[in-house]
Each structure stands twice: as C-alpha cells, then as structure tokens.
Image (cartoon, rainbow, N blue to C red):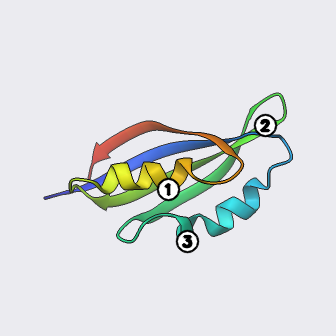
Amino acid sequence: MGRVAATYNLLPEETSFDMEGLKANIGTIVPAGVQVARAEVKPFAFGLKILEIVCVMEDKEGFVENLEERLRAIEGIQSAENVGMTLI
C-alpha cells in the first residue's frame, strides 16, 4: 500500500473564530497514523479565513473517513471540504 496526501479547507462558522489557535492544535485533533504535513491560514471571503491543511496517511480503508469525521466534529467549524487527494 502507498501513502495518500489529502488537502482540506476548514471553514469557520464566524469571522471571530481563532484560526491560528486551531492551526497550532490541529496535530492533536487528527487521528493516530495521520500526519499534518502543512497547515496554513488563508483569507477566504467577507473577513472569513480558512485553515488549509495537508494530511499524509497510509492508503488504508477507513483512514480518510475517520479523518473527515474528526475534522467535521471541530466545534466552530461549519465545513471541512476535501479539495484534493493524491497518492505519494
């Protein structure tokens, strides 16, 4: 099996959400076996900022689903959109 790099955009519910705090703690939120290779806060629209993360994990059944469940469960985040996935 190979490894997968998946890119996600995390969009907060409000402009006041602490995206820098989330960036600092995102490594503790992802499941075991998933490495956050990059995390960057970017402007989005109307004062909102997104957190773009790239996660690297084994290409095994259930890893992506588990990661997405964890990301969508973050309090204050309205969506966690997968914007790209590739084998590495």
Above or below for 21 versus 28: above
Crowd class of label 2 (few under 14; some 14 to 19; many from 20; radius 10 Å): some
The image's mark for residue 52 is none
Crowd class of label 1 (few under 14; some 14 to 19; many from 20; radius 10 Å): some
- Distance between mark 1 and mark 2 Cα atoms: 22 Å
Question: Which residue is identified by label 2?
Answer: 48
Describe the element under mark 2 as helix, strand or loop.
strand
Residue placed furthest toward the top: 46
At x 66%, y 61%, the residue is: 23
Q: Position of residue 79 (x, y in %)?
A: 59, 38
The image's mark for residue 70 is 1
At x 47%, y 62%, the residue is: 37
Crowd class of label 3 (few under 14; some 14 to 19; many from 20; radius 10 Å): few
Q: Is residue 26 left or right of residue 32?
A: right
Q: Are marks 1 and 3 in contact (CB under 8 Å)?
A: no
Q: Nearer the viewer, mark 2 or mark 3?
A: 3
Nearest the viewer among 38 and 73 is: 73
At x 84%, y 34%, the residue is: 47
Question: Which residue is identified by label 3?
Answer: 28
- Amino acid at dot 3: Thr
At x 35%, y 41%, the residue is: 85
Describe the element under mark 3 as helix, strand or loop.
helix
